[in-house]
Image (cartoon, coloured by chain):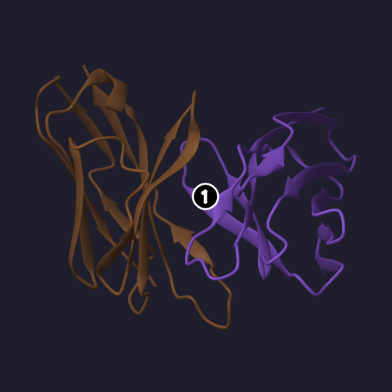
Amino acid sequence: DAGVIQSPRHEVTEMGQEVTLRCKPISGHNSLFWYRQTMMRGLELLIYFNNNVPIDDSGMPEDRFSAKMPNASFSTLKIQPSEPRDSAVYFCASSLMAGGKETQYFGPGTRLLVL
Amino acid sequence: GEDVEQSLFLSVREGDSSVINCTYTDSSSTYLYWYKQEPGAGLQLLTYIFSNMDMKQDQRLTVLLNKKDKHLSLRIADTQTGDSAIYFCAENPGGYNKLIFGAGTRLAVHP
């Protein structure tokens, strides 16, 4: 099993540019989560999907952020336009909720630096 | 509301036991989790405990759950330098398809 796959692993961009982060969940998992991690704010849940449908996007900072999950094996998180304060590590996680147990498996993260 | 609290930092000597504590708020959480994050890596599931258990042991790891006080702890026996990492406690509030994470406890192991 390849685990959760994220790309790119590192991204450096200039303020105002569009950034697209990609995630491939573990095959068979039915939930997908996007998190952001910074020193100041810790780990924040941005949005999560269940069976490809967005369930809770209350953590999305503002309209510059959008996320899609067109099928069970792919999701994107887009920032447009990007700002320096968006610099963070973005994690994707997936899970298969069974019997009340919600075990999330994290990808390696995308380290984003907006200059 | 939902909230998970942990102390931010713990320093121990190599070979000693480490105890990382966590408090949570939702008594309906069915499972409680410990994740480990090494530098530059994602979170890795370390262990979990079902809410009707008081204790779970897995090699050097012991999880204790006090459901009355909503207190969870992780004990690492014979702590090694490779255990240096950030440890996150998480709860799974009943009816929700998501985890609520604490801020993480940074464990530093020194010789």
- Left/right placement of residue A13 relative to residue B25 reads left
Chain letter for purple?
B
Q: Position of residue A24 (x, y in %)?
A: 27, 62
Above-or-below relation of A27 to A35: below
- Left/right placement of residue B85 relative to residue A103 reads right
Q: For this rendering, which residue is in front, A84 or B78?
A: A84
The residue positioned 89% from the left and 43% from the top of the image is B17
Q: Position of residue B36 (x, y in %)?
A: 61, 48
Q: Please, what secondary structure does the residue beneath circle 1 have?
A: strand
The residue positioned 83% from the left and 31% from the top of the image is B12
Above-or-below relation of B107 to B35: above
The residue positioned 84% from the left and 42% from the top of the image is B18
Q: Amino acid at mark 1?
A: Leu
Which image quadrant: the C terminus of chain A? top left
Instruction: Check the rendered structure and report the hue given to chain A.
Output: brown
Which image quadrant: the N terminus of chain A? bottom left
Q: Quadrant of residue B107?
A: top right
The residue positioned 58% from the left and 77% from the top of the image is A100
Q: For this rendering, which residue is in front, A56 or B45?
A: A56
Q: Position of residue B105 (x, y in %)?
A: 68, 36
Residue that label 1 marks = B43
- Left/right placement of residue A55 relative to residue B68 reads left
Query: How many labels sit on residues?
Result: 1
Q: Quadrant of residue A17?
A: top left
**Mark 1 surroundings: few (<14), some (14-19) or many (≥20) residues within 10 A:** many
